[in-house]
Image: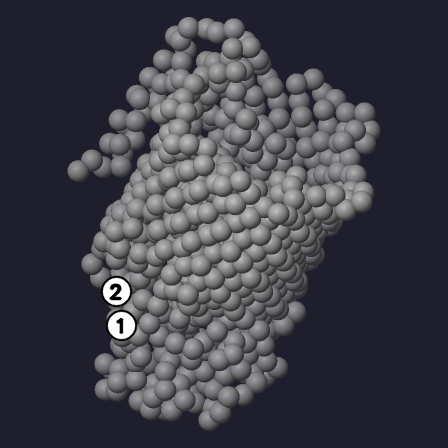
Amino acid sequence: MHTHSTWLKSLLPAALLLAGAGAIAQPLDEDELALSYGDNTQVSIATGSAQAVSHAPATATVITAREIKAMGATDLDQVLESVPGLHVSVSHLAYAPIYSLRGSFTNFNPQVLMLVNGLPITNIFAGNRSFAWGGMPVENIARVEVIRGPGSALYGADAYAGVINVITKRAADIDGLEAGARVGSFKSRDAWLQYGGRLGALSAAFYLRAGSSDGARRIIEEDSQTRLDAIFGTSASLAPGPLNVGREAIDVRADLAYGKWRWRSAYQKRDVGVGAGVAESVDPFGRIPETRFYTDLSYEHAGVLPHWDASVVLGYYDLREAPGEPAFRLFPAGAFGGAFPDGVIGNPGHYERNTSLTASAVYTGLARHRVRIGVGHRIADLYGAPEFKNFNLVVVPGVGPVFEPLGSVVDATHVPELGYLTPHKRRLSYVFLQDEWALAPDWSLTSGVRHDAYSDFGSTTNPRLALVWDAAFNVVVKAMHGRAFRAPALTEQYTINNPVNIGNPAIRPETIATSELAFLWKAADSVQTGLTLYRHRMRDIIAATANPDPSTGKTFRNTADQSGRGFELEGQWDAGRAVRVSGSWSVQHSLDEMTGKDPGLAPRQRLFARADWRPSPEWELGGTLNHVADRRREPDDTRPQLADYTTLDMSLRRLAGAWELRATVLNLFNRDVREPSLAPGNIRYDLPMPKRSLSFEITRRL
């Protein structure tokens, strides 16, 4: 078997050969070059301004609404699985998505920054997108932009392994009234209505969607209570038992533009099941209700002064995750030798609001330079942490944390010795500078730096540098290096009364330094390829580690360093006017520098391939193949390695005037797909994913 380093060594000569082939190719007239090799695909998050993906100073992928339709995707997670180097896994808690990028894999996934229309939607509570994420429908998405690699020089915290920017549709993207509905397996039902047009002087877009699903109620064979039953000699576990992954969702969006002003607002309501259980114990009834409200007002003025463009964005984000109803049962009735006849009930919630103001300007008065400067301030306020529970966690010396019954469910919100978290407010001020320098006709150098000053854990400065070279008319070479950071979540800093994992206000942010070398070659009008090689090193990784007296539980600390390297090979071939074939091969190898072992969970290899055939303007058939391989366990997990899997999805679309019909089958061959459960393996046989599923969709433009 080839080692990872052997693969890299074999690919380097190939990359140099690609560059050399372009260098000796026959030169063409400039107009012919523009027609044959012009790249109309634009990306905005690499520098803050739209530019061609091929020349962006980052490793970038753009998926358009047209491509989303072709792949038959109904949710953002399906779209993101098509990105090289990115695998979508799930957490046991509510089956929330984990966007594993280049080997980064943690349960709450704070190492990937998600933006919606350029504004962060990461919460400060746990650093994720919320526990009740509940999916993001794609009908109102105009494009998805992804950069792999560090982005903190422009976006600050959590732009660590990568950045995802979801851009919703404007009035011109919708251009009229559209209604749609979809039904599918697991009693899934969705309906939506969207409009784009003029309302007097306003350019307006609106979107309304409602949906529900029972989810794939696959069976959890053994859970954490199964282990406890073996200790206490009981049979309280509900395993084997089905996953609790049902959802109810409402999405409302509005987008109004007038001259240089634009106002966008969104409301999302979710009610989702707890997945495989909050404590990895089957809970068939627990629910997580949540509401999210986003709004932003922006002003953009090109030419506000000679050589100056300016913009200001005021943003607000409010998240309310109320204690669930029915309440979470961490462990079922009869747990801990019968001490909890109604089960262990722990029902936390959290409320937070984030307010931000960013002002930036672009100066073009220097020859061959485009300079962007900006300042901003953000206030993140965790203003509520309600909790209802019927237990207290106490430390028994020599034994460890144990559950002590309280006799009944009590409101622990304002009880200092019972509550799990108290309100906290975090303030952030930042300044950034970026210069795009066309230093020669075929060379450009982008440099940038951002300084972030936090009120609770201090300051951090993160630079980046990217050199882009047009080696030939059809070959682009990029060399890039950057640093990024991940801010500690409030649960990692301030969790109390939970000796299983105690917060630590002294922890520092995680950091990463990444170097990349990329080659893009457009071999012909119909063929384009890309190869990216990368290395990174993570420092001060935050994890809960055992205290000097292990019986007193764990405390969050900066504990480990991790290094990684890999490559992403991708290509696209228009095999005729009616056929397009595309795909990627991603390979990564990571090493925990303390243990000398792979940190586990993330796939070392992933192969993705897609083919689209349009035999006539009315019909379109597409297929997607996804192969996930070589996933290791965490170093302290003794279970056998996870099995590889390969899935095939198919989609058939029919256009008939104003009508559009689509049928999609996912996991056509009904594979038993499993995503990893965490060490030590309380869910012994991992997290089962849906088997074969069908959906049928109808859309009408009115």
Q: Can residue 60 be seen in this view?
A: yes
Which callout, 1 or 2, points at the residue further toward the start of the chain? 1
Question: Which amino acid type is marked by label 1?
Answer: Glu
Instruction: Please give the name of the residue rendered at 23% of the width and 81% of the height, measured from the top-left corner.
Output: 230
The x, y position of residue 23, in whole percent, is 41, 11
Residue 376's place in the image compared with 369, above or below, is below
The x, y position of residue 224, in whole percent, is 31, 74
| The N terminus: image quadrant | top left
Q: Which residue lies furthest to the left in this view?
A: 1
Instruction: Please give the name of the residue rendered at 26% of the width and 26% of the height, measured from the top-left corner.
Output: 10
Q: How many neighbours does mark 1 have within 10 angstroms: few (below 14), some (14-19), or many (20 or more)?
A: many
Q: Can you tell which quarter of the image residue 90 is in?
A: bottom left
Question: Which amino acid type is marked by label 2?
Answer: Tyr
Pointer 1 and pointer 2: residues touching (CB < 8 Å)? Answer: yes
Left or right, 20 with reference to 196 = left
Q: Distance between the residues labelled 1 and 2?
A: 7 Å
The x, y position of residue 580, in whole percent, is 38, 30
Instruction: Please give the name of the residue rendered at 35% of the width and 51% of the height, measured from the top-left corner.
Output: 665
Left or right, 272 with reference to 550 = right
In-front residue for pair 329/10: 329
Q: Residue furthest front?
A: 657
Q: What element carries label 2?
A: loop
Instruction: Please give the name of the residue rendered at 38% of the width and 35% of the height, measured from the top-left corner.
Output: 612
Left or right, 562 with reference to 311 = left
- Can you identify the residue that label 1 sits on? 222
In-front residue for pair 107/415: 107
- Can you identify the residue that label 2 sits on? 685
Q: Can residue 595 be seen in this view?
A: no
Residue 218's place in the image compared with 111, above or below, is below
The x, y position of residue 344, in whole percent, is 41, 83
Q: What element carries label 1?
A: loop
